Amino acid sequence: MRTTRLLALLGVLALGATAAGAQPPATPRPAATLTPEDYAAIYQLYARYAFALDKAVDNGQMWANLFTRDGVFVDANGTSVAGRAKLAKYVWDRATRGPFRLITYLSSIVIEPAPGGATARAYYLTMNVASGQQPTSLVPGGSFFDTLARTPEGWRFRHKVLVAPDGPAPAAPAANPSAAAPATPRPAAARAPLTAQDYADIEQLSARYAFGNDTGADNGYMLAGSFTPDGYFLATVPRALNGHKELAAASLEASAGMGPFNTRHWTWNVLIDPAPWGGATGRAYVEVTIAKGPGQTGSIDNGGSYLDTYAKTPNGWRFTQRHPVLDWRRPVVVQAPPTPPAPRP
């Protein structure tokens, strides 16, 4: 009986507290979300980061423009640089313009939605280029811990911290009003004509190319089929390959004597841009493993980069041209040219 009266009293007190002004629990805000287009754009931001940094394109301004206007970069030594003017100067002052300037390799990019944008982590490797008899190698450079914002210019880094492999966990970025603000949608006119599916398909095309080149799979047609029927490959040596038949034969020749899971081609930082004439253009870093012989450890050779054009066919995206170049022999291509490539010889 006493228990019943106590429960009734507690109920009355609760009602009285509500009437006196107590508020019901706040409705939780919906969780931040990212669309497939957001993920595609962020991956492309990281790909562009490597090219802009290594070549100090536009006197460092291309790299600086990958940040918000008040963006901050903190290097592994704790040096903090804020604002695009200082960011551009930071890159230009440290740039080494010359051979083998393809040294930034990013992988394992983990992206998470966050209020006002996203957070991301990425592994960072640097190329230790061979000198004399020393082998070329990839060296762990640390990890990036980033916050990103969707701006009218597209996705940009707001706060980027590089932590050395043995460094401490990064501090949280300083409070910024834009971090809690709703994401600003891009103007419709600024949207790229390539969809998230297009970007994913082209990245998969690049992956299939490597497997086809290294293994000669499908009697050479795994590689050949990654090109249009009249696809064109211009090698670094004076040798052009035209069409599926020549490409398949070259794949078999390159993989002759190799095992079924030979791995030689490593493609990084796949940069994709919509082309004004339709289709797309691209660029990617390429490294090649040189085998020493059975049972011996191979070495890494800096293979330069690929310059690519793509077409969307009834069978999916395919290369129309792929041209591997040594970066110091050809000016950096940042954007697609205004007209289609010149006719092939």
Image (cartoon, grey):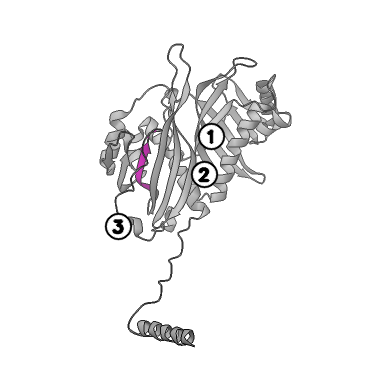
In front of the other: 5 or 135: 5
Label 1 vs label 2: CA separation? 14 Å
From the viewer's perspective, is residue 155 above or below residue 323? below
Label 1: element kind: strand
In front of the other: 205 or 194: 205
Label 2 vs label 3: CA separation? 40 Å
Label 1 vs label 3: CA separation? 41 Å
Q: How many residues crowd around disc 1 within 10 Å: few (fewer than 14), some, or many (20 or more)? A: some
Q: Tell me, yes or no, whether the highlighted magenta stretch contains residue 157.
A: yes
User: Which numbered disc flags the more N-terminal residue, 2 or 3?
Assistant: 3
Amino acid type assigned to the residue bearing label 1 in the image: Asp
At x 64% / y 28%, what residue is drawn? 213
Residue at the right extreme, as displayed: 219
Q: On the image, numbered disc 1 is attached to which residue? A: 308
Q: Tell me, yes or no, whether the highlighted magenta stretch contains residue 303.
A: no
User: Which numbered disc flags the more N-terminal residue, 1 or 3?
Assistant: 3
Residue at the top extreme, as displayed: 133
**Measured from the top left, where is residue 108 in percent x and y?**
50, 39
Q: On the image, numbered disc 2 is attached to which residue? A: 277
- Residues shaded magenta: 156-164
Q: On the image, numbered disc 3 is attached to which residue? A: 177
User: Looking at the image, do the residues carrying marks 2 and 3 touch, with CB atoms under 8 Å apart?
Assistant: no
Quadrant in the rendering for residue 266: top right
Amino acid type assigned to the residue bearing label 3 in the image: Pro
User: Which numbered disc flags the more N-terminal residue, 1 or 2?
Assistant: 2
**Measured from the top left, where is residue 78 in percent x and y?**
29, 36
Amino acid type assigned to the residue bearing label 2 in the image: Trp
**Measured from the top left, where is residue 296 in percent x and y?**
60, 16
